[in-house]
Amino acid sequence: MQVLKFGGSSLGTRRKMEAVAAQLLNRANSKQLMVVLSAPQGMTNLLETMLQQAQLGTLETSQLQEWQSRCLALIANESATARSHDKNNKNKDNDNDNDNDDHSIQLNKNTQTQLESFIAQQTQLLEQKLQGIALLGECSNKIKAKLMSMGELISVQIMQALLNAERASDDTSTANATHANSAKNASTTKSAQILPAHQCLKASGDYLNAQVDIPASAKNLQRWLTEAEAEAATAAETTTTTGATATAPQAAKTTITLVPGYQAAHEDGGLCVLGRNGSDYSAAVLAAALKAECCEIWTDVDGVYTADPRSIKSAQLIKHLSYEEAMELSHFGARILHPKTIAPLAQHNVPCLIKNSQNPLQQGTLIDAQGDPSLPIKGLSNLSQMALVTVSGPGLKGVAGISARVFSCLAQRNISINLITQSSSEFSISFCVEQRALTPTKKAISNEFDLELKANLIKPIDIQKNMAIISLIGDGMRHQVGLAARFFASLAQAHVNVCAMAQDSSERTVSAVISEQQAQDALKVCHENFFTHMPSIDVFVVGCGTVGEQLLEQIHRQQSFLHKRNVKLKVYGIANSQKLLTNAHGIDLSQWQQDLSKAKQSFSSDVLKAFVKRHHLVNPVLVDCTSSNAIAGSYLDYLTSGFHVVTPNKKANTMAQTYYQKLKDTARYRHRRYLYETTVGAGLPIIDAVQGLQNAGDKLTEFGGILSGSLSYLFGLLEENQPFSKAIQQAREKGYTEPDPRDDLSGLDVARKLLIMAREIGLQLELDDIDIEPLLPNSFQAAHNDAESIEAFMARLPELDQHYQQRQQQAAANGKVLRYVAQIKNNQCQVRITELAPDHPLASIKNGENALVIQSDYYQPIPFVLRGYGAGATVTAAGIFSDIMRTLAWQQQGAA
């Protein structure tokens, strides 16, 4: 015996019902089937709506008509021509809705008339009951149960008719006799009968959420099946003696028994139901009572997933679960399983298989006693619409029986508790209940502890609404150290505040109570860390100049490489000074320029923050490729809002010392990364080297460096006797200088870099504290007009050629070379043109290179030297890209 259950989504249309019928006919060749059917999709909801309105004194005839029309649509025959036309359209559209037109079934006129009569009777009964309810303004649970189960009765009646009907070919006009005869014989030997669940299944408890008595039900079922088999045998003998065909006696053993799900017989009389979506439970208790070899649950998804695939797109199918794992998943909100389903199967050791009626070839999920021990973690679940209730006060400490009183008063009112936790000091008890049960919960506790509340031995009951329980579930958790720590670290990564936590003694489940608003973010990060192992980086690039454009090109080019490393890096936003382009699925970097030109919205931090919140991006990174003071001044806001900040913009780190310190402190406190390697040496890891030395306990005593690729290139050309004006022009043409070369020649850019270095080693300095020698002599600057254009400025540069020729000749006469050097010595900072001896480590730095020379406690008398290219969009973008990748290292919470 096999028990199969088909949910409402598998029975929602005539085509889907026919597909189920065809599957059952094929399966019944070798197995005896007990088939539990839910109501067709949406029917129970419609019944519930009509009941609620009737209790308010309203009877909507339009809804009754909708009920009847939907029932009649399930029995209406379609012509072969119409079916063929629909099938061709499906093929053209590549539709995956597996309604299976190859198994079309036509109902004969007599059967159809009988079904129409049955539907009319049910509709009339429904109307009469609803009219009575509307007149009284109330409805007992006993009556409500009878009406709520009417959809299942419709399902079994229609399915029986389809199973017992002759199967029609796609083209009835050309169907051959052989096909027709085989179909007729098949329907004769595989006829279906209906088992009256409201007589055979015995239950007790609430009429709307009853519990089945499996031993008593097993006796009833065996008695009914024996009687049904005897009646069939008698009918077969009668048919044989009256001259029936030779195949008729085969009908003596009916191989398909249909059972209306969700309903049972109450011990106090009348019909009861087993809780919403209780057809799963019906199948489970039938399988347990009949000792079936398997219980199959056919639904609209491929099985149980590691998370809800509707919200977590990367959720993976779980192929094998133990009963205990399945029960934990169902208890904590896995929608594929009814919470009461697994217990009877586990008790009677009946395997359960979850399958998709729309994708029957998919393997599905098997649930049995063994599970899959090779996978320690099976899934994440989310139980939403919860309330966290806390009972606390000095009257709880050391008093025996307090916990018993709390939970006993709730049990007396049938209030289910989903999670319990108690402080070790015994000062407080916290538990979660469904939010809809909050009012009776509060009333129950207030009544139970009325005296203690009045005497201030217990504080007023604390209630936190709109909560969710996030749980990590797996049998193997007890055998692996650190999984709970990883779980809570993942919640911290998602910036989720944990309000309560619990872990059972079996170590199969660890749960956290969090705000429901944060549940999606929590699930996303936890799923990345435990299942997909593909952490995400959610990038927003501001500034589309030379560096920004090159960065986007590198990100686009590296996608395949990143995917191989299990890193998901997407650019969700690109902005220039005028427009902002965003895309919830990630921007297509092959055409971002065209898309940005068509963008409608303007860039603002509020827009980005709203976008991140709306789409649950848990690792957002702001990449500032501008030189904007305004954006640099907003870094603090971005860090506070959960963004990492990556930037080559030097403005933020050279603003006031107090702002710089707030950036560092906020990044550390918020566990965000504030990364600015490219502010000093472009692609050269100068800051990383200095931080590494300090982390190792080294103390820097003197620092010297060439920190400008453009000026390194310039002084290299001067050494080759190039005129100053031509050297500047050449550096500008190669893209080494800023758009306005005066920004380089003022020395302020290098001074900013030096200030960043000084602050990195702990010096409390401002930009004004740095002694700067500009490359433009005072006399030349005095003649400078602030409104002078770049081209006018470039035209005047030959005036300085002689000045620099003389300085270069003087340095050569001294056996030295000119370099623009930034220096920190004795806690003093200066930037100036310096003559260096040929053996000085900085003397050979030119052609756009940067270099760093550090003398420290560890590196003396031979200094630590770091050297490499420090100019150009490519290396700068590469440095930014490297910083972006470092946002994956969120575990390094101390790093800013």
Image: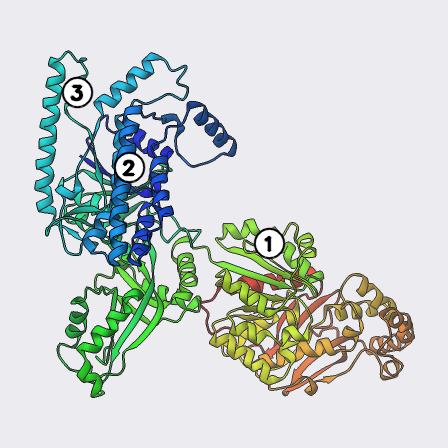
Q: How many other residues sit within 10 Å of disc 3, few (<14), some (14-19) or many (≥20)? A: some
Position of residue 540 in the picture relative to residue 292 (left or right): right
Estimate the spatial distance between the alpha carbons at disc 3 and disc 2, rounded to whole Å.
Answer: 31 Å
**Residue at the (15%, 18%) spot, across then down:** 249
Which residue does the numbered mark 3 point to in the structure image?
A: 250
Estimate the spatial distance between the alpha carbons at disc 1 and disc 2, rounded to whole Å.
Answer: 53 Å
Q: Secondary structure at mark 3?
A: helix
Q: Secondary structure at mark 1?
A: loop
**Residue at the (92%, 75%) spot, across then down:** 799
* Residue 32 picture location, percent across and down: 19, 31
Compare marks 3 and 1 and give the one earlier in the sequence. Answer: 3
Residue placed most toward the observer, 143 or 273: 143
**Residue at the (15%, 70%) spot, across then down:** 408
Name the mark on residue 587. Answer: 1
Q: For the residue marked with disc 1, what is the amino acid?
A: Ile
* Residue 652 picture location, percent across and down: 63, 76
Mark 3 or 2: the one toward you: 2
Q: For the residue marked with disc 3, what is the amino acid?
A: Gln
Which residue does the numbered mark 2 point to in the structure image?
A: 119
Q: Quadrant of the N terminus?
A: top left
Mark 1 or 2: the one toward you: 2
Q: For the residue marked with disc 2, what is the amino acid?
A: Ile
Kindly check if marks 3 and 2 are in contact, taking CB atoms under 8 A apart as contact.
no
* Residue 395 picture location, percent across and down: 19, 84
